[in-house]
Image (spheres, rainbow, N blue to C red):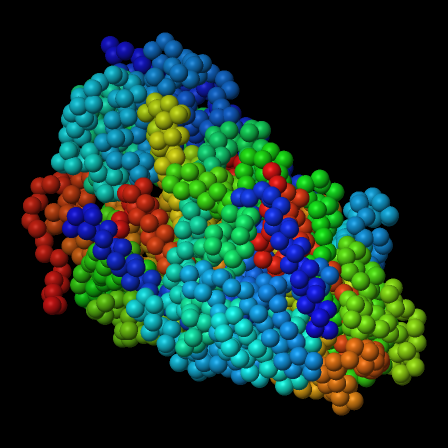
C-alpha cells in the first residue's frame, strides 16, 4: 500500500474584491499517493493552476489567498505552516515544473548555478559535491554533454532541453511530490512525448507522487493513474483514469471528452480535379542580412522553405502539418503574400501572384483570405467588431453601407449576437473572437481560405465548435481551404488531404486517411506515434506506427541549384 | 574567436560607425553657428572696447572667417582628420589644450555624479520595490520626484547656503583652494572636498530617474515566472531579490545610464555655473556667446566621442550582465 | 473609458496629481480674471514681503506682483510644455513610425539621424538653438522639441516594430489595406498609451528646461513665465527669497503633479503592472 | 600749470615713501573676484573690464592717480610740460627691471606709445593722437612731441589705460598675436604665474620690485565664479576678499554691508564715469523726431530705476555729461531730465507734436534692445517698457546675445532704441565725443555714434572742446554742447552708475588709487 502524501480537503481560494467571482476554487478535495500520477484536467479558468500553486504556498498573496480548507502534506497543514517551514519544503519535499521553461528559468544565470542553488539552500554539501551531483542530474534527464550544459544559459538550449533542465532541478533533492503545471503544452508533440516519458521514468526511479496539471486528455490518457476534472474552481469528477476517460459521469466531463477530436480520419470527400492554387518549388530563406543599423553580425541563415510544391484542389481542405520551425506558417504567409518568396511560383487562375506588385496584388485579395492563430492578437483592440469585419470590403472599394450590411450578415453566419457589431474585441471570449476573425476573412467572399492554426489557442470544447463552423462555412461558401496545424487529431477531423512538413520541406503528401493508415516517411511515423492518448482515443487498429520503415521521398525534390 | 578579440572587433566597429555621426554633428553645428549673427571678432572687439573695421577685418582674415563657409568647413574637417581641432579665437590657444584642461573636471563631475545617482538610485529603487506600497515606498517615491522637480540652481544655492555658509563643511565653489595651492595627496583631498556639493546637486536630479526606473524594473522582474520558480525551489526572498531579480532589473538601468551621459555633459551647465566648476559645459556656454566656433565645435566633437565611447562601454557591461546579448 | 478611470483612480497619488494639474490649468485659464492687469505692471512697493502691501506672495525688485506673475506665468509654462511636447511627439512619431514600419534602409537612415540628435549634448544644443533663433517663446519651444523628440522616435519605432508583426496588422495586409492607413488607423492607436505616458513626462521636462533656459537668461523677455520669474529673482534669492521661490515651488508642484499623473497613466494604461500598483 | 603738477608730485612722493615706511603685515594670499573670465591678458590690445582687474598688477603705467585725481609717479618719476603744451618730457625711474630681468628703458616707453598703444589699443589712438614723435636722449628720458596741446592725455597714463610693455618681447612680431598676450611680463609688483581656464589667474609677488618693501602680499589670485549668488556666498565665506564692478549684486552688497567683516565702497571709479543711457536710431524708425526722444527723457523716473534696480547706488543724469565733470567745470544741468519723471509733461509734448493715441491708447510701437550684460539691464528694460507704455509707446523687448546685439546696433543699425552704458572716462574728449560726432559714425565700430546723429554745429563745438587749453572757454563750449544735446537728445542719458566694490575688512591698503580695482594692489595687505 502506497503511502498517502497529500490530502487536500475543502480547499477554498478567495479572489480579490471586484473579481468576476468570489472564489477561484472552492470545496476542492484531492489526494495524492506515493508513486502515483494525479492529473488535474480542466479548461482555462478552471482553477487547476491555482490549486497547484496553493500546494507550494505560491499564491499571489494577499490578493489571492486560501480562505478555507487544508492541504495536509505528511501530517502538516501547508496552509498554516511558517514561512520558514514552507521554504524548507519547497524544492526539497515538493517541487514544481512549469509550462514555459524559457521564462521559468532565470535568463541571466547559468543552468549550473540555478541547479546549484537548490543544494545550497537545502543541504550542506561541498562545492565540488554539488557540482558533481548537478552533472549527474543533467545526465539523468538525458541531456547531452552535461558539463557543457552546466555553463550554458537558458537561451542557448532548445525548448525540450530547457524543460529537461527544469526537471533535473525539480528532482535534485528527490522530492516526494512533483507538481507539473502543463509542462509540455509549449513543446512540440515529439518533444512532448519524450518529456512525458522522462517524467514517467523519473517517477519510477524516485517513487515520486506527481500532480500533473493539463488541459489535454490525450496526455491524461498516457500518464495518469487517477484524474480530477475541474470546472469553474470545482472538482466535478474524479476517479481512476479508466473510469473517467472511458465512462465519464459528469456532463461536463462527457462534453469535454467528446470534444477531443478522434485520431481516426473522417471520411474524405471526393476531390475535384480543378486546381485553384498551385505552389511550385517555392523557397524562402531568412536571415543572412545584417541586423539593425548594420550593428549585428550577419545573422544565421535559415531555410524556411525548400522547394515546396503543393496543389490545392477546388473544394478540398488541405492540411499542412508539422512541428514548430517546419515552415508551415511561412508557407501560409508566402501564399497570402505577407512575405515574399525567394524562388518558385504561386499561381492562382493562371496568374503568378508571388510576383505581383503590392498594388496589383490588391485585387487578388478578394480571392484568398486568412484566419489567424491567436484570437487575441489578430483583432485590433481599438476598432469595433463591425468595422473590423467591414474593413476589407471598404478597402476593396465597396460602399460603406453595403460593407456594413454584409458585416451584419456575417456576424450572424458565424453565430454571434447582432449586438456584437458595436462592441470592441476585448469584450469577447477567445472562441467568439475567432468567429469574428473568420467573419472578417469571409467578408471579401474569398475562394481560398488559409487557416493558420485557427484552434490551437482555444480550449478543447471551443475548438470543436470552431472546427464545425469552418466546416459549415466551407460547405456553404464553396471554399477551398489550407489548414495549418500541429495537431494531428485536428488534422484528422478537418483535412481531406494533408502535407507533412519538416525543416522547410514537404516530406509527405497524400489523402489524410492514407497517411494515417500508412505513413511513408519516418518523420510522419514519429509524429503519429507521438500523439498523446492514441491508445485511448486513437487511430483504428489499422495503424501501427513504427512498423513501416520505408522512407518516402518527398514529392518534387528537384533541387534548383 | 576568443571573447576578447570579439570585444575588440566590436569596439573597433562601433567606433568606426560613430565617425559619420560625429561628422554630422560637427557639420550641423558648424552651419547652425554660422547662421547666428555676429562672429568671434565682433565679440572680441566689443570686449576690447572699440576697434576699427580695418582691425576687425584683419582679425577675420587671421581667423579665416573671411573665407566662404564651405571652405571654412573643409579646412576644419581636414584638420580634424589629423586630430587638429584648430585654434580658439577667444582664448588665443589651441582648442585641444583648452578642452583637455577642462575635460578632467567634467569627467570627474560626471563619473562621481553617475556613480552617486546610479548607486543611490538603485538602492532607493530597490528599497521602494521591496517595501512596495508601504510608507517607505511612498517617501522614496516622493523624495525622488521632488529632487527631480526642483530647479537645479535652487538646490545648488541652498546647498551652498546650508553646507558652506551655515555649517562650513564645504567650500562654496571652485575646484581647488586657491589660497593654498595644495600638492600631492592634499590636492586630491582638496579637490574631493570641492567636488561634494556639485556632485550631490547634479546627482539629485538624475537620482529620481534611476530610482523610478529601478523600482519599476524590480517590480516588473518580480512578476516574472523565474521568480516563482526560485520560490518553488525554496530560496530565501533575500536570495531571490539580490541574486535573481536584481541582476535582471539592473539591465534597463544600465542602458539608461548610457543614454544619460550625453544629457549630463550639457545638463551640468547650470551646476558648473553655480559652483564655478571649470567644466566643459560652462566652456561651451561661454564659447557659444563668444562665437568661438572652433572651440565650440571642438567641445561638441569631444562630447560626441565621449557619448559614443560611454555607450560602447555600457553595451559591453550590458553584454557581461546579460548572456543573451552577444557583442559582435 | 470608465474602466480606465476606475483603474486610474486606484492610484491615489495620481488622482492627487490630476487634481493639482486641473487647479493649475484653472488658474491659467482664469488668470485674466484673477489678476486682470499686465503681470509686468509695476504694482506697488518693490520687494514687499509676502502678505505685505497687498501682495499675497510679495513683489519683486520692480514692484511687480509675484502672485500675478505665477498666475499668468502658468499659462505660458503650460503652453510651452504642451506645445513643445506636441511638436516633439509629432516628429518622434513620424520618424519612429516610418522607421519601425518600413525597416531596412529607411530605418537605418532615420535611426542614424535620431542617433545624431541623441549624441549631441542636449541642453547645450538647446541653448545654442535659442541663442541662434533669438530668445523668444517660439525659439524656446523649438529648442525643447528638437532635443526631446529622439526619445519618442525610439519608443514609437519599438512599438511599431512589435506591432507590425502582430496578426491583426497582417490581417490588414491580407485585406489589401494601404500602408498609410495601416500605420495611422491600425498601429498608431495601439501605441498611444506609451506615447501618452512619455508625453506627459515630457511636458514636465519641458517646463524644467524652460526654467533652465530662463535661468541662463534665454527666456522670452516679453512674456511672463515661471522661468522668467526665476531668472529675474535668482540673484536676490538670499535677500528676497519669495521672488523666485514661489515660482520655483509652482514649477515643483506642477512637475511633480504631471509626473504623478504620468505614472498613474502608466499604471492604468499598462495592465501588465496593474496588479502590483 | 606745469608747476602745480610738479609740486603735487613731489608732495605725493613724500607721502608715499612714508606710507611705505610704516610696518605693514607682509605675506598672505589675496583672492579676489574677476568677473567674467577675461578673454586674454593683453591689456595693451583690449580694455575689457576683467583684463583691467588683473593686468595693472603686472604691467605698470607712467603714472597712477589718487582718489583726488592727482598724479602719482610710477614708472615716470616726474614730467615737465612746455608752455605751449606741445612738448612733454618724462623722467623715468631708474633701476626698474622687467620680470624677466631685462632693464626698463625709454625705448620701451617710445615703443609702447607709438607702436603698441597708438596702433592696436582701442583708446590709444584717441589718447595719443597728437603725439607725433618721441625722443629718447638717454635711457631714462622720453620727450613727447605733440601736434596740438592734449590736456586729456595726461589723464591716460594709468596702468589700465596705457600699460608699459616690454619692447624686447614684442618688437618685430605681430603685436596682436604675440605670445606675450597670455604670458605677460611686466614691471609691476606681481608676476604672472598661471591661468587655469575656468578657475583662476595666479600672480605671485615680484621679489625684485623697484620699490623696496613692496608689495606686501605674497600672492594674488583672481577667481572666476559665473553665478552671482555664488560669488556673494564666496565673499561671505571669506573665500574671496575683494569684488569690484558689481561682481557682488547690489542687493547682496546692501545686505553684506551690515556685516562687521565686509564693507562696501563706491570709490575707485572716478576715472570711469559710467553712464546708463538709451541710444536712438535717429535716421529711421519711430524715433527720428527729437520731440519724441525729449518726451521719453521727460517721462522716465530716473530715481525709481536707481532705487529699485541698483538699490540706491547711482545719480540721475542731468545732462549729456556726467556730474563728475563738475570738478573741471564742464558739467551743467539741463532741462528735460526730471529726476522722478513727469509723465503728464511727456504726454503733453507728444500731443503737441501730433502723435495721437489710437483706440488702445497707443501712439506708436517700438522695439527696445537691451545690452546683454546682466540681469540689471533686463530690469531696466522692463521698467522702461512700463514707463513708455504710460506715454503711449508700446515697447517690445529684445534681449540677444553679445555678438548678435553688437552686430545689430553697431554694424547693421537694425535697431530703434537700445539701452546701453558708456564709460565717459576722465574727460569728455575720451568718453563722450565718440557718441555724437559726425566723424564717429563708423559703421562696424562698437560703442561709437550708432545713433548716426550728425550736426555740423555740434561737430565744430566738439572739435574746439578737444583742443581748447583755456579752462573757462572750455566750460562755455561744453555748456553749448550740452544745450544742443538736451534739445536733440540723440541719446537719452538715464543715470550715472555707481559701481560697488565689496571687500573684506581684513584687506587694507587696496583703496588709495583712483583706478580702484584697476590699480596695482602693491600696497594692499591683510590684517589677521
**Visible in this render: residue B246?**
yes
Seen from the viewer's position, the closer of residues C37 and A150 is C37
Seen from the viewer's position, the closer of residues A396 and C103 is C103
Picture residue at 64% right of the left edge, 50% below the top: D19
Seen from the viewer's position, the closer of residues D275 and C195 is D275
Seen from the viewer's position, the closer of residues C156 and B194 is B194
Picture residue at 35% right of the left edge, 24% below the top: B235
On screen, residue A410 versus residue C257, left or right, reads: left
Q: Where on the picture, by quarter, is residue B308?
A: bottom left
Which percent across, then down, holds residue C40?
Answer: 78, 60
Figure check: A551 above or below D101: above
Extreme bottom residue here? D456
Which quadrant is the C terminus of chain C positioned in? top right
Picture residue at 57% right of the left edge, 77% below the top: D143
Figure check: A148 above or below D172: above
Which percent across, then down, holds residue B122?
Answer: 45, 37
Figure check: D424 above or below D522: below
Which percent across, then down, holds residue C105?
Answer: 34, 68
Q: Where on the picture, by quarter, is residue D73?
A: bottom right
Which percent across, then down, holds residue B258?
Answer: 40, 50
On screen, residue A23 versus residue D263, left or right, reads: left
Picture residue at 60% right of the left edge, 38% below the top: D528
On screen, residue C83 versus residue B316, left or right, reads: right
**Visible in this render: residue A204?**
no
Q: Please state the total of marks drawn on the protein image.
A: 0
On screen, residue C211 versus residue B15, left or right, reads: right
Amino acid at each position: 500500500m502506497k503511502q498517502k502524501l497529500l490530502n487536500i480537503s475543502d480547499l477554498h481560494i478567495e479572489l480579490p474584491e471586484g473579481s468576476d467571482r468570489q472564489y477561484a476554487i472552492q470545496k476542492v478535495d484531492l489526494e495524492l499517493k506515493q508513486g502515483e500520477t494525479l492529473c488535474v484536467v480542466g479548461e482555462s479558468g478552471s482553477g487547476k493552476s491555482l490549486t497547484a500553486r496553493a500546494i507550494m504556498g505560491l499564491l499571489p498573496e494577499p490578493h489571492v489567498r486560501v480562505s478555507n480548507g487544508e492541504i495536509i502534506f505528511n501530517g502538516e497543514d501547508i496552509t498554516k505552516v511558517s514561512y520558514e517551514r514552507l521554504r524548507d519544503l519547497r524544492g526539497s519535499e515538493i517541487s514544481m515544473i512549469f509550462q514555459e521553461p524559457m521564462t521559468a528559468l532565470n535568463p541571466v544565470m547559468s543552468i549550473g548555478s540555478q541547479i546549484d542553488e537548490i543544494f545550497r539552500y537545502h543541504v550542506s554539501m561541498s562545492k565540488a559535491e554539488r557540482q558533481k551531483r548537478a552533472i549527474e542530474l543533467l545526465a539523468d534527464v538525458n541531456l547531452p554533454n552535461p558539463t557543457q550544459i552546466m555553463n550554458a544559459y537558458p537561451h542557448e538550449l532548445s525548448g525540450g532541453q530547457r524543460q529537461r533542465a527544469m526537471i533535473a532541478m525539480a528532482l535534485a533533492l528527490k522530492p516526494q511530490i512533483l507538481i507539473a503545471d502543463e509542462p509540455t503544452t509549449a513543446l512540440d508533440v515529439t518533444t512532448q512525448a519524450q518529456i512525458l516519458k522522462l517524467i514517467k521514468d523519473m517517477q519510477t526511479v524516485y517513487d515520486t507522487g506527481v500532480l500533473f496539471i493539463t488541459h489535454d486528455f490525450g496526455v491524461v490518457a498516457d500518464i495518469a493513474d487517477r484524474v480530477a476534472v475541474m470546472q469553474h474552481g470545482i472538482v466535478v469528477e474524479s476517479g481512476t483514469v479508466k473510469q473517467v476517460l472511458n465512462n465519464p459521469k459528469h456532463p461536463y466531463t462527457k462534453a469535454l471528452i467528446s470534444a477531443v477530436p478522434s485520431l481516426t480520419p473522417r471520411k474524405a470527400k471526393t476531390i475535384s480535379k480543378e486546381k485553384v492554387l498551385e505552389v511550385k518549388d517555392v523557397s524562402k530563406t531568412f536571415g543572412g542580412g545584417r541586423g539593425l543599423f548594420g550593428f549585428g553580425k550577419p545573422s544565421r541563415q535559415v531555410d524556411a522553405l525548400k522547394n515546396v510544391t503543393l496543389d490545392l484542389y477546388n473544394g478540398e481542405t488541405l492540411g499542412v502539418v508539422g512541428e514548430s520551425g517546419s515552415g508551415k506558417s511561412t508557407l501560409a504567409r508566402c501564399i497570402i503574400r505577407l512575405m515574399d518568396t525567394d524562388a518558385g511560383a504561386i499561381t492562382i487562375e493562371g496568374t503568378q501572384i508571388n510576383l505581383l506588385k503590392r498594388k496589383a496584388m490588391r485585387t487578388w485579395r478578394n480571392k484568398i483570405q486568412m484566419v489567424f492563430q491567436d484570437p487575441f492578437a489578430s483583432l485590433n483592440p481599438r476598432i469595433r467588431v463591425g468595422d473590423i469585419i467591414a474593413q476589407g470590403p471598404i478597402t476593396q472599394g465597396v460602399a460603406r453601407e453595403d460593407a456594413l450590411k454584409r458585416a451584419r450578415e456575417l456576424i450572424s453566419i458565424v453565430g454571434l449576437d447582432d449586438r456584437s457589431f458595436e462592441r470592441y474585441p476585448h469584450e469577447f471570449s477567445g472562441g467568439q473572437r475567432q468567429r469574428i476573425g473568420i467573419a472578417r476573412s469571409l467578408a471579401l467572399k474569398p475562394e481560398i481560405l488559409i487557416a493558420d492554426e485557427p484552434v490551437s489557442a482555444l480550449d478543447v470544447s471551443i475548438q470543436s465548435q470552431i472546427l464545425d463552423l469552418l466546416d459549415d462555412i466551407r460547405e456553404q461558401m464553396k471554399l477551398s481551404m489550407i489548414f495549418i496545424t500541429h495537431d494531428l487529431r485536428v488534422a484528422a477531423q478537418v483535412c481531406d488531404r494533408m502535407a507533412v512538413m519538416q525543416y522547410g520541406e514537404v516530406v509527405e503528401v497524400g489523402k489524410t486517411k492514407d497517411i494515417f493508415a500508412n505513413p511513408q516517411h519516418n518523420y510522419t511515423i514519429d509524429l503519429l506515434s507521438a500523439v498523446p492518448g492514441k491508445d485511448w482515443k486513437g487511430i483504428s487498429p489499422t495503424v501501427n506506427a513504427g512498423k513501416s520503415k520505408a522512407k518516402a521521398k518527398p514529392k518534387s525534390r528537384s533541387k534548383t541549384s | 574567436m576568443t571573447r576578447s578579440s570579439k570585444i575588440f572587433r566590436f569596439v573597433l566597429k562601433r567606433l568606426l560607425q560613430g565617425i559619420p555621426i560625429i561628422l554630422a554633428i560637427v557639420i550641423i553645428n558648424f552651419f547652425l553657428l554660422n547662421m547666428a549673427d555676429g562672429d568671434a571678432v565682433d565679440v572680441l572687439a566689443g570686449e576690447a572696447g572699440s576697434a576699427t573695421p580695418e582691425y576687425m577685418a584683419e582679425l577675420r582674415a587671421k581667423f579665416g572667417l573671411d573665407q566662404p563657409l564651405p571652405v571654412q568647413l573643409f579646412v576644419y574637417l581636414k584638420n580634424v582628420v589629423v586630430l587638429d581641432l584648430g585654434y580658439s579665437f577667444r582664448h588665443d590657444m589651441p582648442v585641444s589644450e583648452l578642452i583637455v584642461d577642462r575635460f578632467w573636471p567634467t569627467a570627474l563631475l560626471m563619473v562621481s555624479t553617475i556613480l552617486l545617482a546610479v548607486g543611490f538610485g538603485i538602492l532607493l529603487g530597490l528599497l521602494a520595490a521591496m517595501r512596495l506600497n508601504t510608507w517607505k515606498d511612498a517617501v522614496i517615491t516622493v523624495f525622488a520626484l521632488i529632487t527631480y522637480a526642483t530647479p537645479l540652481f535652487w538646490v545648488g544655492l541652498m546647498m551652498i547656503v546650508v553646507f558652506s555658509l551655515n555649517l562650513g563643511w564645504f567650500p562654496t565653489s571652485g575646484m581647488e583652494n586657491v589660497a593654498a595651492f595644495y600638492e600631492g595627496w592634499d590636492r586630491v583631498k582638496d579637490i574631493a572636498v570641492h567636488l561634494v556639493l556639485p556632485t550631490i546637486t547634479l546627482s539629485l536630479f538624475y537620482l529620481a530617474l534611476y530610482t523610478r526606473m529601478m523600482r519599476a524594473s524590480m517590480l516588473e522582474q518580480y512578476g516574472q515566472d523565474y521568480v516563482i520558480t526560485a520560490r518553488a525551489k525554496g530560496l530565501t526572498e533575500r536570495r531571490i531579490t539580490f541574486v535573481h531579480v536584481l541582476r535582471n532589473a539592473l539591465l534597463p538601468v544600465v542602458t539608461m545610464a548610457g543614454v544619460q551621459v550625453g544629457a549630463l555633459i550639457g545638463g551640468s551647465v547650470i551646476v558648473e555655473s553655480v559652483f564655478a566648476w571649470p567644466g566643459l559645459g560652462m566652456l561651451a556656454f561661454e564659447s557659444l556667446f563668444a562665437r568661438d566656433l572652433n572651440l565650440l565645435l571642438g567641445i561638441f566633437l569631444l562630447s560626441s566621442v565621449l557619448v559614443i565611447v560611454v555607450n560602447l562601454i555600457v553595451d559591453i557591461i550590458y553584454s557581461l550582465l546579460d548572456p543573451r546579448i552577444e557583442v559582435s | 473609458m470608465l474602466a480606465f478611470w476606475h483603474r486610474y483612480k486606484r492610484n491615489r497619488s495620481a488622482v492627487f496629481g490630476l487634481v493639482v494639474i486641473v487647479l493649475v490649468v484653472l488658474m491659467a485659464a482664469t488668470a485674466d480674471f484673477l489678476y486682470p492687469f499686465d503681470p509686468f505692471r509695476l504694482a506697488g512697493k518693490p520687494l514687499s514681503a509676502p502678505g505685505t502691501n497687498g501682495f499675497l506672495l510679495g513683489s519683486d525688485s520692480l514692484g511687480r506682483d509675484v502672485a500675478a506673475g505665477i498666475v499668468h506665468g502658468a499659462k505660458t509654462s503650460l503652453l510651452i510644455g504642451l506645445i513643445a511636447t506636441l511638436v516633439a511627439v509629432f516628429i518622434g512619431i513620424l520618424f519612429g513610425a516610418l522607421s519601425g514600419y518600413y525597416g531596412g534602409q529607411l530605418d537605418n537612415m532615420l535611426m542614424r539621424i535620431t542617433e545624431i540628435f541623441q549624441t549631441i549634448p542636449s541642453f547645450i544644443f538647446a541653448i545654442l538653438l535659442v541663442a541662434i533663433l533669438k530668445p523668444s517663446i517660439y525659439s524656446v519651444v523649438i529648442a525643447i522639441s528638437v532635443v526631446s523628440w529622439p526619445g519618442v522616435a525610439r519608443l514609437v519605432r519599438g512599438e511599431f516594430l512589435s506591432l507590425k508583426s502582430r496578426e491583426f496588422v497582417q490581417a490588414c495586409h491580407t485585406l489589401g489595406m494601404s500602408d498609410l492607413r495601416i500605420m495611422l488607423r491600425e498601429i498608431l492607436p495601439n501605441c498611444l498609451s506609451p506615447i501618452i505616458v512619455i508625453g506627459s513626462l515630457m511636458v514636465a521636462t519641458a517646463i524644467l528646461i524652460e526654467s533652465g533656459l530662463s535661468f541662463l537668461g534665454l527666456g522670452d523677455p516679453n512674456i511672463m513665465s515661471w522661468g522668467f520669474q526665476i531668472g529675474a529673482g535668482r540673484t536676490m534669492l538670499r535677500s528676497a527669497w519669495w521672488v523666485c521661490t514661489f515660482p520655483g515651488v509652482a514649477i515643483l508642484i506642477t512637475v511633480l503633479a504631471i509626473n504623478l499623473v504620468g505614472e498613474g497613466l502608466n499604471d492604468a494604461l499598462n495592465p501588465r503592472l496593474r496588479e502590483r500598483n | 600749470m606745469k608747476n602745480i603738477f610738479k609740486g603735487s608730485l613731489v608732495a605725493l612722493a613724500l607721502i608715499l615713501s612714508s606710507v611705505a615706511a610704516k610696518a605693514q603685515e607682509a605675506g598672505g594670499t589675496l583672492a579676489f573676484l574677476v568677473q567674467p573670465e577675461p578673454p586674454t591678458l593683453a591689456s595693451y590690445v583690449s580694455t575689457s573690464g576683467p583684463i583691467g582687474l588683473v593686468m595693472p598688477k603686472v604691467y605698470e603705467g607712467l603714472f597712477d592717480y589718487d582718489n583726488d585725481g592727482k598724479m602719482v609717479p610710477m614708472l615716470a618719476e616726474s614730467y615737465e610740460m612746455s608752455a605751449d603744451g606741445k612738448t612733454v618730457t618724462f623722467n623715468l625711474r631708474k633701476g626698474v627691471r622687467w620680470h624677466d630681468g631685462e632693464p626698463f628703458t625709454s625705448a620701451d616707453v617710445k615703443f609702447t606709445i607709438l607702436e603698441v598703444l597708438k596702433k592696436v589699443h582701442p583708446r590709444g589712438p584717441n589718447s595719443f593722437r597728437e603725439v607725433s614723435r618721441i625722443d629718447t636722449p638717454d635711457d631714462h628720458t622720453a620727450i613727447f612731441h605733440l601736434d596740438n596741446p592734449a590736456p586729456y592725455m595726461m589723464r591716460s597714463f594709468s596702468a589700465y589705460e596705457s600699460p608699459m610693455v616690454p619692447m624686447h618681447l614684442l618688437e618685430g612680431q605681430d603685436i596682436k598675436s604675440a605670445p606675450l598676450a597670455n604670458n605677460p611680463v611686466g614691471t609691476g609688483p606681481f608676476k604672472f604665474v598661471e591661468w587655469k581656464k575656468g578657475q583662476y589667474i595666479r600672480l605671485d609677488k615680484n621679489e625684485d620690485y623697484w620699490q623696496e618693501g613692496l608689495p606686501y602680499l605674497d600672492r594674488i589670485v583672481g577667481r572666476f565664479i559665473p553665478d552671482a549668488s555664488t560669488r556673494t556666498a564666496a565673499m561671505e565665506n571669506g573665500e574671496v576678499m575683494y569684488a569690484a564692478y558689481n561682481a557682488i549684486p547690489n542687493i547682496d552688497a546692501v545686505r553684506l554691508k551690515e556685516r562687521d567683516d565686509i564693507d562696501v565702497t563706491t570709490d575707485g571709479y572716478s576715472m570711469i564715469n559710467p553712464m546708463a543711457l538709451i541710444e536712438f536710431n535717429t535716421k529711421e524708425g519711430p524715433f527720428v523726431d527729437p520731440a519724441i526722444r525729449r518726451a521719453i527723457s521727460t517721462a522716465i523716473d530716473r530715481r525709481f530705476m536707481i532705487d529699485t534696480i541698483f538699490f540706491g547706488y547711482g545719480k540721475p543724469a542731468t545732462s549729456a555729461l556726467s556730474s563728475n565733470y563738475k570738478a573741471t567745470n564742464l558739467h551743467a544741468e539741463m532741462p528735460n531730465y526730471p529726476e522722478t519723471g513727469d509723465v503728464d509733461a511727456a504726454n503733453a509734448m507728444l500731443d503737441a507734436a501730433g502723435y495721437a493715441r489710437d483706440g488702445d491708447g497707443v501712439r506708436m510701437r517700438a522695439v527696445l534692445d537691451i545690452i546683454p550684460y546682466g540681469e540689471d539691464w533686463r530690469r531696466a528694460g522692463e521698467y522702461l517698457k512700463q514707463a513708455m507704455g504710460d506715454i503711449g509707446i508700446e515697447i517690445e523687448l529684445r534681449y540677444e546675445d553679445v555678438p548678435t546685439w553688437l552686430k545689430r546696433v553697431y554694424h547693421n543699425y537694425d535697431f530703434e532704441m537700445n539701452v546701453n552704458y558708456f564709460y565717459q572716462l576722465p574727460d569728455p574728449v575720451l568718453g563722450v565725443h565718440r557718441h555724437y560726432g559726425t566723424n564717429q559714425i563708423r559703421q562696424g565700430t562698437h560703442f561709437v555714434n550708432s545713433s548716426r546723429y550728425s550736426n555740423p554745429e555740434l561737430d565744430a563745438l566738439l572739435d574746439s572742446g578737444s583742443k581748447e587749453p583755456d579752462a573757462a572757454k572750455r566750460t562755455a563750449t561744453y555748456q553749448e554742447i550740452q544745450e544742443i544735446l538736451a534739445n536733440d537728445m540723440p541719446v537719452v542719458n538715464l543715470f550715472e552708475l555707481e559701481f560697488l566694490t565689496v571687500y573684506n575688512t581684513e584687506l587694507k591698503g587696496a583703496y588709495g588709487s583712483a583706478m580702484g580695482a584697476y590699480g596695482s594692489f602693491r600696497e594692499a595687505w591683510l590684517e589677521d
